[in-house]
Image: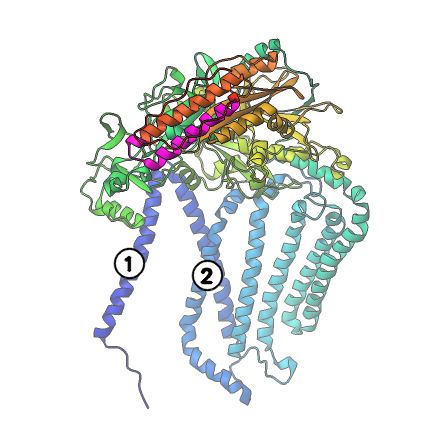
Amino acid sequence: MSTIRLPSRSRRWPLVVIGAVVVAIVLFTAFSGFVIDLLWYREINQSGVFWTVLRTKTVLAVVFGLLFFLILYVNLIIARRIRPTTRILSPDQEVLERIRDVTDPLVRWALPVGSAVLAFLVALGVTGEWSNFLLWKNSSGATFGTTEPLFHRDPAFYVFSLPWLRFLQGWLFSTLVGVTILVGIAHVLWGGIRPQAPMFADKVTPAARAHLSVLLGLIMLVKAWGYWLGRFDLLTSPRGVVEGASYTDVKAQLPALNFLTIVAVICAILFFANIRLRQWSLPVIAVGLLALVSVLLGAVYPAFVQQFRVKPNEQQYEHDYIGDNIVATNTAFGLAAIQAQERDVSTGPLTARQIADNSGTVSNIRVWRPPVLKENLQSVQRFRQYYDFNDVDVDRYTVNNEERVLMVSAREISQQGLDPSAQTWQNVHLAYTHGYGAVAAQVNTATSEGQPDYVLQNLPPVTSDPALDMSQQPRIYFGESGHEPFVVTNTNVNELDFQQDSSTNTTYTGTGGIPLSNILRRAMFAWKFRDYNLLVSGSISSSSKIMIYRDIQTRVRKAVPFLKFDNDPYLAIVGGRPVWIWDAYTYTNEYPYSQQVDLAQAAPGQDSSTTLLQGNVNYLRNSVKVVVDAYDGTITYYANLADPIVQVWSRAFPGLFTDINSAPQELWQHFRYPENLFQVQAFQYAAYHVTDPTDFYQKRDFWAIPSDPTLSASGAAPVAIHPYYQLIRLPGASTEEFELVIPFVPADRQNMVAWMAASSDQPDYGKLTVFRFPEGRTIEGPTQVFARINQDARFSSERTLLSQAGSNVLFGDFLVIPIDNSFLYVQPVYVQAQQTPIPQLHDVIIVNGSGGAVTIADNLQDALKGAVTGQVPSGGGNQGGGGTVAQRIQALLAQAQQHFAAAQAALQSGNLGTYQAEIKAAQDAVDAAARLAGTTPTPSGTPSPSASPSASASPSP
């Protein structure tokens, strides 16, 4: 007989070494990940969050892992101990007996080890329930102050307790089913179950029958608990016209669940009785009855009621349940607090007196679109390729002792913009560590060249307004750009501040960053980022700090993973230093009777198909304002502690939240009502302003948010118009406030029927107001007015001329500005040369009142004058279609001169391709001017590089 030779020791040691190395790598990875996370939470002063989450996950893993181990192991031991000691074997059972003989010596250690392995896997899966457990554990006393109409429970039960109870029931059921299957297999292996026995009564031994009866009885009890909990799920049922318990749910599904609960308990009792009866007939009959009742009462009967009773008379049967849904939805989304009022509206134009009386409103009308302004900033205010403007935000500041709406953008670092030859490890991670300063532009004006009117600009930042002064701390280490995973400060390499004639350097003195105080920390970070320069670089000392998670979105979401966040964090200058403000939301999908909404659909990001705010919810509150210091990276959570969900989270994480009422006044002045919450509320209110169940069922007077006409004009897919911040005086108010505004149109038409505003100023912060127009009054909506603008002969002609001159025409945000009892419709237009894509404000188009004439001028002030008087003042700059023919010709020739200048600059730099393109664009502009003057342009080819381009004199009109 041959023998199996084991490898000699000399051949086994490489395998041992490889195994040891693998184990060491796994352990070091886990250890370094743990330590780095702990150090990072300490950096942001949130070690309590780290330990609470870790402790909760550990407790859940230990408790449920140990419970699973005990349930499985004890039952396997019982199965082994009650196995028959003597067995009469048939020929068919000899193979099974051989398997028993082989496995029996292994059972002593295989049972605990196998049970432990399965328990470990179960424990890992349970840790994901930490948030549901904390909500349940800390929910004592939390209340929403109302009760649902079916079971008369406070929504707190459904929001905080039901998800955890549902998990417990599901876990117990799956555990018992899995253990029962494994125990059944064990009984087969050890002879307690004998499939080959000739008599049915002999196929299962009495002991095995009793054992399995206990397990099956427990499964039935847990199933009964599941049916009982399933009754509460009816309050978010999607079966009816709206979500929540419908007629069928209450009259058919609920009785079925009650009956199934009783039947399941009876089944459990019969299984337990079978310990003594030792007969399968009654338990099998009971289980069969449960299955039959589950199909007939739980599925067939409700479907029959829905199809043949409810559907033919749906409005009558669902009336009360629709009413319950309307009340709950309005409460869950904060719509019940909306102050709705009907206001008479005029179809006539606004007068000069009305414009003058609302000077604070008209002087803050936005003529710049954030993405357009961003392109301008990238070209004009970037200065160096390693800076970047990631986003442009709208906020209000005191400028020249007046509250003005500004657009603000942070100048952040972007190491990817460095020349490839300069992207060394030291430059990327040690020298170019931070952005510097910000830029702010007035929203309502432009220079004579159509460029933004900056009130904060340049390097270092220059401003004449104290509210925008950044001299205390202009550096931005934490922002929206996070291209590099880490930077290291306080090294032997100078950190670049900014560069003018010479470089200005700095050394970080803030509290941000994790000290690299020893070689072990350096090794852990080197392993985390797979960057061993961190370990060997001589530029790093014990006083150096490493900054990670510098992207504020990653930073905040890692710090508080139980909140949802707005799409748009925004920069504010507070106390001479930049801070980021990010609106965070508490949410649930368990609020009884409330209609859930797809957040990505209701609140899409502007000019982007992606959105941070995703998922389905039926309750949403902006309960937390997150403030991140751009220099230190410290995070403060200002919370509305009246929200029940915040109350529970604050108990789970003591000291995490700060009462929003204690926020500094200077910071409060920059809190905005969040755009995404407003979008969601407007989306829901478009239907839920209808509070009569009959009208709601018939969808009578449903509204919609109009599509953005400027995007439709560019051929893009229809997207709802984005709400816009505007300093306006609401009807009946005495002063202007910073409001978020959006119009409504009927669901099937384009005329405007109402508009909604949300206040961002104290003491009215969060106040929602809806102004509805009287029935029978037709007011033009955005799509209708935009169509008239596009059809205007002057504007159409101008677009054609600009296109022929080689320029792109871009549209700004279409704005509906409410003033007194009428509206100004405002459409900014920009021009962008194809070869030098710096957008310029070219036209401001205003329609004064519904049905008013289209007025085109080159700036807001002239457009307003023309909209009121009917005559557009003449002036310099980029004259719009409202100017004279001579002025438009002059504008085209000015563009030609700019192209000629750009061509000369390209020639001097040796870029012949750009030179030729600019010469062609200049010639096209001259040709367009000649056609407008009624003369035939003189054909000309591309001048030679030695030619000196010059513009022709302005022809006479």
The type of residue carrying mark 2 is: Ala
Q: Does 545 lie within the magenta span?
A: no
Q: Is the magenta stretch mostly helix, strand or loop?
A: helix
Q: Name the residue under label 1.
A: 24
Q: Tell me where the magenta segment starts and ends, as one range.
A: 907-932
Image quadrant assignment for residue 51: top left
**Res. 323 image quadrant:** top right
x then y, percent, for residue 896: 42, 25
Residue 226 lies, with reference to residue 484, above or below; the image says: below
Please tell me how crowded label 1 is: few (under 14), some (14-19), or many (20+) other residues with Cα within 10 Å: few
Q: In the picture provided, is 881 more to the left or to the right than 198? A: left
Q: Does the magenta stretch include residue 911?
A: yes
In primary-sequence order, the first of circles 2 and 1 is 1
| Amino acid tagged 1 | Ala
- Tell me whether the residue at label 2 lies in contact with that at label 1, contact meaning CB atoms closer than 8 angstroms: no
Q: Residue at x 65, y 67 (%)?
A: 271
Identify which residue, 18 or 395, lies in the foreground.
395
Horizontal side of 214 relative to 694 (left or right) equals: left
Labels in figure, total: 2
**Neighbour class for label 2 at 10 Å: few (<14), some, many (≥20)?**
many
Q: Name the residue under label 2.
A: 119
* Residue 88 visible somewhere in the drawing: no
Decide: is 75 above or below 492: below
Residue at disc 1, secondary structure: helix
Measured from the top left, where is residue 29 in percent x and y?
Answer: 32, 53
Extreme residue toward the top, this view: 353
Nearer-the-camera pick, 747 or 584 = 747
Is the residue 734 above or below the residue 831 in the image? Answer: above
Q: In which quarter of the image is the N terminus?
A: bottom left
